Amino acid sequence: MKRDYANYQVSLKLYLRKGNKALFLKLSDNDFWDLPGGRIDNVETKTPLKKILDREVKEELGTKVKYKLGKPLFQFRREVRRRGIYNFLTVYEAKYLSGEIKLSSEHNSYKWINPKTHKFMKTDFMSAEEYGTFMKYFLRRV
């Protein structure tokens, strides 16, 4: 018997590196770690992914931040329980070039973290899958 397909909203995130550190944001509504970026809007079905990601980064970090976009690094799924939806997220590498960070209301703080030395906890992320994906990526880079 054929089952229905899963429905996901698609998100693009940026793993923004500055030297050996990466930019991590804290979500305002639940204090989990997050990366800059967000969902593809319904009017962006033909918009290049790079432009969508750039729009999201400007919305969340301000218009002054400049970066050089790299390739996709990893993917994971995230359940947004309060909305009853699921996101499928692709994380792209990027090199921070310049600009002052001005957070939107979606995040309450940020920190440049060396992921090889920082002690991340499962409770810092929305799910065990998200935590495991990040840790697998960081361990592969050691």
Image (cartoon, grey):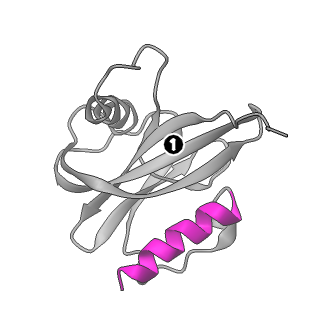
Picture residue at 36% right of the left edge, 86% below the top: 142
Relative to 47, 39 lies left or right = right
Residue 139, located in which quarter of the rendered image?
A: bottom left
Q: Is residue 23 left or right of residue 94?
A: right
Does residue 59 sit above or below 42 in this rendering? below
Residue extending farthest to the top is 43
Viewer-side residue, 49 vs 108: 49
Q: Secondary structure at mark 1?
A: strand
The x and y percentages for residue 79 are 70, 45
Secondary structure character of the magenta stretch overall: helix
Q: Where, by quadrant of the figure, is residue 113 drawn? A: bottom left
Question: Is 25 rendered above or below residue 7?
Answer: below
Residue 133, image x and y in percent? 54, 67
x 60%, y 71%: residue: 132
**Quadrant location of the N terminus?**
top right
The one nearer the camera, 131 or 1, is 1
Q: Residues within 10 Å of mark 1 (few under 14, many from 20)?
A: many
Q: Amino acid at mark 1?
A: His
The residue to which callout 1 is attached is 107
* Magenta stretch holds residue 68: no
What stretch of residues is rendered in magenta? 127-142
